[in-house]
Image (spheres, rainbow, N blue to C red):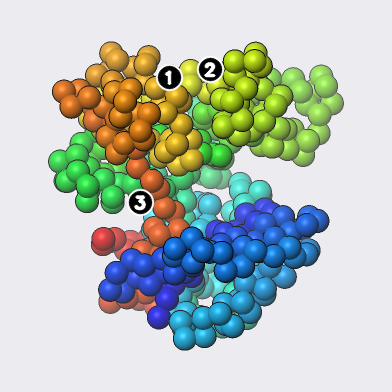
């Protein structure tokens, strides 16, 4: 029996197929891209990174993409019966503190949350509904990206708006929770309970960028808030912007809310500042010859250093700093620049170790251990799904899944 993980975005679906029971074994990984656009693609690799599928396909909608995926799975792996599907769901609201089995009640509640996550939830709901229609007997589990941050203190969650807006759900939720949860589990395995229970800051630097302060294994504060666009400079997202600037664009420049939303999510960040690319690799290659590429990189690192220092204040310092995700795992120059302003916290980077992308890039005598760790949100989803459906204390069909205690 195996577990399928689905991460459904606005124009793509990422997938993973795992065996979890006896050992954590990746069987397949792949993606369906450019959904709703021209020149779509369907790619699948096996556990040894050998290409099994690499074909151009027309994917007019998510239903077509999911149908293609499940039909291929049935042909390729008929002997690997699916036990369950785990879905990444970006927003669980204030109610869901842990993964939950998909029920009609859950779907109804997710639909109510669409206004606060309009760019993500509709596609994730469609993926769940299609799977339910095509395979009504298949167990599905929603894994919420916001759940990890439900432990944040009340003051870290609220915004300084009139109080009644809190009751309408306008609070700081935080995101990248599945990534942070995976890193914390792996940190406990690699460095032990003392490190995992200490003062930890994790920098998830990828296409989306955020940081979290963790103490005693719990999220205490994070850089993203009500939406994933807030906080740090990202590939195409702006990060924190004075709300007055956005009001000015609407009132004085006549920018429509939909255009404003598209600008701060798709055309800002590294892409907007550089005018060249949203990819940090491209900018690093052109930094010496393109002034705006240099400025975009400097702004990215400046904001990251500033937010990291603020998170250290929240938990009274830092014992372990972890860099993860695409930039965090593979860009030594960015790690070096972020850390060089933070020596007052005891953060140091050994240049040789850093350039080699070593597991620990701080000097042996440093007060803060700086680590580079590979994240794996799909595996975290598979773990959650397996744990939930095999946990005897879970009551099938109930709505109290948020009370589940996790293992592993």
Q: Which mark is residue 298?
A: 2
Which residue is found at the position 48% from the left and 40% from the top?
326
Q: How many marks?
A: 3
Q: Of residues 387 and 115, which is closer to you in this image? A: 387
Residue 333 image point, x, y percent: 45, 24
What mark, if any, has residue 337 been given in the picture? 1
Position of residue 252 measured from the top left corner of the image (x, y, whole percent): 81, 19
Q: Nearer the viewer, mark 3 or mark 2?
A: 2
Q: State the residue lying farthest toward the right.
A: 254
Q: Position of residue 63 (x, y in %)?
A: 70, 70
Q: Residue at x 59, y 83 (%)?
A: 75
Residue at the spot x=74%, y=20% of the render?
Answer: 248
Q: Which of marks 2 and 3 precedes in the sequence?
A: 3
Identify the disc placed on residue 182: 3
| Nearer the camera: disc 1 or disc 3 | 1
Is residue 276 depicted above or below 178 in this figure? above
Categorize mark 3 by other alpha carbons within 10 Å: few (<14), some (14-19), many (20+).
some
Visible residue check, residue 157: no
In the displayed structure, 153 sits above or below 268; it is: below
| Helix, strand or loop for disc 2 | helix
Is residue 34 in view from this perspective?
Answer: yes
Q: Residue at x 22, y 51 (%)?
A: 189
Could you say which is closer to the camera, residue 76 or residue 36?
A: 76
Find the distance from the CA under tag 1 to the CA under tag 3: 26 Å
Instruction: For label 1, count other residues whose C-alpha is less than 10 Å away and answer few (under 14), some (14-19) or many (20+).
Output: some
Disc 3/disc 2 C-alpha distance (Å) = 29 Å
Disc 1 + disc 2, Cβ < 8 Å: yes
Give the mark nearer the N terminus: 1 vs 2.
Answer: 2
Q: Quadrant of the N terminus?
A: bottom left
Q: Whole-percent x and y of residue 18?
A: 42, 69
């Amino acid at each position: 029996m195996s577990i399928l993980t689905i991460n459904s975005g606005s124009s793509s679906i990422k997938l993973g197929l795992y065996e979890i029971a006896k050992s954590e074994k990746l069987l397949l990984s792949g993606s369906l891209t450019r959904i709703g656009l021209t020149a779509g693609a369907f790619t699948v690799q096996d556990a040894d990174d050998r290409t099994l599928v690499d074909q151009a396909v027309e994917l007019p909608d998510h239903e077509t993409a999911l149908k293609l995926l499940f039909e291929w799975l049935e042909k390729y792996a008929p002997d690997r019966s699916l036990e369950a599907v785990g879905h990444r769901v970006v927003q669980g609201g204030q109610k869901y503190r842990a993964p939950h089995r998909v029920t009609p009640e859950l779907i109804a509640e997710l639909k109510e949350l669409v206004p606060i996550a309009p760019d993500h939830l509709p596609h994730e709901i469609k993926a769940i509904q299609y799977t339910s229609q095509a395979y009504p007997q298949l167990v599905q589990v929603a894994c919420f990206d916001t759940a990890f941050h439900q432990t944040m203190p009340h003051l870290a969650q609220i915004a300084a708006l009139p109080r009644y807006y809190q009751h309408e759900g306008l609070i700081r939720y935080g995101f990248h929770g599945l990534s942070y949860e995976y890193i914390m589990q792996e940190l406990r395995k690699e460095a032990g309970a003392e490190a995992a229970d200490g003062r930890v800051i994790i920098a998830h630097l990828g296409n989306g960028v955020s940081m979290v302060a963790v103490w005693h294994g719990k999220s205490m504060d994070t850089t993203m808030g009500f939406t994933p666009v807030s906080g740090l400079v990202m590939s195409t997202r702006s990060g924190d912007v004075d709300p007055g600037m956005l009001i000015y664009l609407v009132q004085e420049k006549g920018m429509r809310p939909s255009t404003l939303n598209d600008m701060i999510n798709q055309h800002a960040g590294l892409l907007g500042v550089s005018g060249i690319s949203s990819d940090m690799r491209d900018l690093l290659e052109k930094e010496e010859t393109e002034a705006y590429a240099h400025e975009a990189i400097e702004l990215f690192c400046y904001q990251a250093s500033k937010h990291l220092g603020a998170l250290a204040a929240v938990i009274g310092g830092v014992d372990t700093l972890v860099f993860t995700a695409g930039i965090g795992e593979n860009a030594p120059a960015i790690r070096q620049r972020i850390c060089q302003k933070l020596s007052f916290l005891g953060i140091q980077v050994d240049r040789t170790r850093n350039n080699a992308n070593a597991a620990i890039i701080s000097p042996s005598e440093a007060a803060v251990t700086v680590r580079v760790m590979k994240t794996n949100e799909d595996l975290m989803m598979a773990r959650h799904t397996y744990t939930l459906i095999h946990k005897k204390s879970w009551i099938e069909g109930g709505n109290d899944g948020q009370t589940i205690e996790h293992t592993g």
